[in-house]
Amino acid sequence: MTFLPVEVASRSHFPMANKVKITVKKVSELKPDEKREWKRDYLKRKLERKTEHNDRVRDRLANLRRTLRKATEAKDNTKASAALKEMYSALDKAAKVGVIHKSTAARRKSRYSAQVKAIAA
């Protein structure tokens, strides 16, 4: 079965029945009350995006923490070392974007490395 190309007229050939003029006000053109409402909504959306991102990062840290704990409990040095390496990276990234404080990241890295070192000995 072969298909032959068919020419279709573009949308510009079909005029709209009712032309609707849509105007969008710029933020600078809004009245003070409207501006405050716009900013409140904008900040709410921004906060929701940030919260969602932070929750994903924290979930990743929790999953890596579980993986590391299971590897240390099983006294599996290779898995623990690999999990520790991933945990270092995740903690540094979380601290860089401000999900956790950099001192918190450093403290956790120190404690996790001590756990892995303890099973290696």
Image (spheres, rainbow, N blue to C red):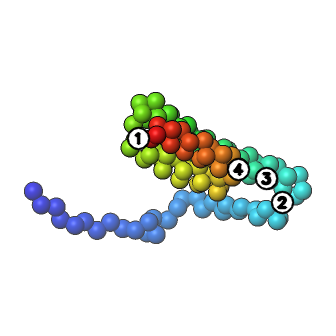
* Pointer 1 local density, CA inside 10 Å: few below 14, some 14–19, many at least 20: some
Quadrant position of residue 107: top right
Q: Residue at x 82, y 65 (%)?
A: 28
For label 3, the residue is: 38
Of the two numbered discs 3 and 4 on the same chain, state the one appearing first in sequence.
Answer: 3
* Pointer 4 local density, CA inside 10 Å: few below 14, some 14–19, many at least 20: few
| Label 1 – label 3 distance at C-alpha | 54 Å
Of the 4 image quadrants, the one containing the N terminus is bottom left
| Label 3 – label 2 distance at C-alpha | 9 Å
| Label 1 – label 2 distance at C-alpha | 62 Å
Q: Residue at x 38, y 44 (%)?
A: 78
Question: Which numbered marker is on residue 12?
Answer: none
In-front residue for pair 13/118: 118
For label 1, the residue is: 77
Of the two numbered discs 2 and 4 on the same chain, state the one appearing first in sequence.
Answer: 2
Helix, strand, or loop for circle 3? helix
Q: Amino acid at mark 2?
A: Leu
Of the two numbered discs 1 and 2 on the same chain, state the one appearing first in sequence.
Answer: 2
Q: Residue at x 66, y 62 (%)?
A: 21
Q: Is residue 49 visible?
A: no
Q: Position of residue 76 (x, y in %)?
A: 39, 37
| Label 3 – label 4 distance at C-alpha | 37 Å
Mark in front: 1 vs 3: 1
Q: Amino acid at mark 1?
A: Asn
Helix, strand, or loop for circle 1? helix
Q: Amino acid at mark 3?
A: Trp
Q: Say if mark 3 contacts mark 2, CB within 8 Å.
A: yes
Question: Which numbered marker is on residue 103?
Answer: 4
For label 2, the residue is: 30
In-front residue for pair 109/25: 109
